[in-house]
Amino acid sequence: MRRLSAVLMASLLLAAPARAAEAPSAATIRAQAELKKTLPFEDRQDFDFATRGYLGTLADPVIRRADGAVAWDLTAFDFVKGDAPDTVNPSLWRQAELLAKSGLFQVSDTIWQVRGFDLANITFIKGETGWIVIDPLTAAETAKAAYALVTEKLGARPIVAVIYTHSHTDHFGGVKGIISQADVDAGKVQVIAPDGFLEEAVSENVIAGVAMSRRATYQFGLSLTPGAEGPVNSGIGKAVAKGTITLIAPTVSIRKTGETLTVDGVKIEFQVTPGTEAPAEMNLYFPDLRILCMAENANATMHNVLTPRGALVRDSKAWAGYLSESLSLFGGRTDTMFTSHGWPRFGGDVVRSFLASHRDAYKYLHDQTVRMMNQGYVGEEIANRIALPPVLARQWFNRGYYGTMSFNSRAVYQRYMGWYDANPVHLAVLPPADEAARYVEAMGGADKVMALAQAAHDKGDDRWAATLLNNVVLAQPANAAAKAALAASYDQMGYQAESSLWRNMYLTGAQELREGVKPALAAGSPDMIANLPSPMIFDLLAVRLDPEKVGDAQLRILFVFTDRQERYLVQVRNQVLTAEPVADGVKADATLTLPRALLLQSLFTGAPLGPKVISGEAKIQGNPLALQKLVGWFDRPAGAFPIVTRPE
């Protein structure tokens, strides 16, 4: 199968018939009923806030890309109605109900939001002459549709400024759907962002972008169909739009808390919050309106301190500290709060209580993880012990629809202690498949292990059943019965999960066991790639260098980028690739002179440079085979690699 072309593999996988998920077990039905008794479902304040100010939505619910494919379907989650089915945790179903409504909502006399058009919200603030837009969604198509809805309902007005609250794609990727680079270059539109935004926006997913994209398929359930046996939301929004990701560089950077700007007559105070939900992030306060925008630092759910798709670990202590600072700076003069996800909160007392309790949840997470860590408990033990105090756990916005106490506590442990738990047995662990094979043999063989797993599954102990079956699947990748049994346990754990992400990951794991690996999603976008700092291009090359192909060889190639007046010497020695900026006169085996855009095109699309050399767009001096040799040393990332089994 691995020898098939990517196109053929994708067509075969897409054509494979889906196999039915297991029905909810008696244990799952009991678990759903028991959880429902523990939470205040009679509290309807969120439903009031989530529907307040609704003005309507698009007449045509399908938003399409230029190629005709669907970027977003406003009706995809219309099944979220009535009582929770047995296949969905009732608390998660409640969150899905709150996120289900899409359209234009009025927040105040001068602020509107379009919600439900993407994972995030897009906010429109009325200035003296036009719109100030906050966070233009993931995709150009959905942002354009949101702007069209605003124009339909509120009248035509130009966009005079765009504000990126932080450096995650769902908060800037749609920018070219509402403004153009030409208008920014002409000074017609400001683009405002926190200091460090551009570097963080293009760098977070670059070095490990292939692996992160693959894992994001699990996190967001991208290969699953929304429904009662699939994704019901993504915790902070419905789902991620499948449109065109764009980027326009900021023209104004906010460097410190306390900075103010007046944009089209609207005064804005900024609070810079690096290292919280994003490496570059900021909150906004509108003093004349008594309205606070908390970006993605405060949500309708506990957030991720470490996102399951992979990222650098966030600082929960700093996160709590910045929420305290928000309370101090703005709490006493705020009547309304809105965020980049979820719904607004109305009333000063409501906002202050929310911020304080949300802060307390992150502080408790940090402090109690460290307390137990200092008592000698390791990450897995802490994850199974930690729980919010009841007064915090019963507040809906502290529930784990996106991040969870269990997952986040392990992230806090990792931030301080790393992956190693100090037990010497974990210094030189066996590869997962080898270890699994030995466990299966020691327990008496696959049939015995599967019998034990079936007994656990029948009792509703699916965590243990999955642990047992995972060993069989890793030890015997062709064991179809073991895969089916493991998928059934993942079904039940997915149905019971309160976290939308855990649900998606369990159900995607079950899908992969039943149907095989789905085609990989494309990583990156032309705008993101074009904004890469040049050193990062060579970092990408370095992590693709295959040492076995290099052997004892050495190589020096000078790259001269004519459009940027940059010169980088790339060296390969000791099976390591390094790059450094150099001045004129440096000797190399070959010199490649070209616009940087041509190199990027070649790296990310596979287009050969040979025709560019023949046409004169690129020039090679010195050994003409040096570049060919270098290119031959790189491998191609797998992309659609397996997760619940192992690569061959």
Image (tube, grey):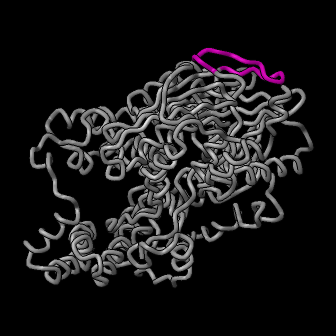
173 vs 69: above or below:
above
Quarter of the image for the N terminus: give it. bottom left
Residue 180, above or below 455: above
Q: Is residue 305 above or below residue 348?
A: below
Residue 353 seen in this snapshot: no
| Residue in view at x 61 percent, y 14 percent | 258
Indicate the position of residue 362 as horizontal and vertical percent values: 40, 36
Q: Residue at x 68, y 52 (%)?
A: 611
Decide if residue 253 is on the left or right side of residue 629. Answer: right
Q: On the image, which quarter does residue 564 sit in?
A: top right
Q: Nearer the viewer, residue 315 or 203?
A: 203
In front of the other: 288 or 448: 448
Left or right: where 105 falls relative to 301: right
Can you see residue 249?
Answer: yes
Q: Position of residue 132 (x, y in %)?
A: 78, 33
- Magenta region, residue range: 254-269
Q: Nearer the viewer, residue 363 or 591?
A: 591
The quarter of the rendered structure image containing the C terminus is bottom left
Question: x%, y% of residue 268?
Answer: 71, 22
Residue occupying image coordinates x 59% and y 33%:
294
Task: Name the residue at 50% across, 54% down.
Answer: 213
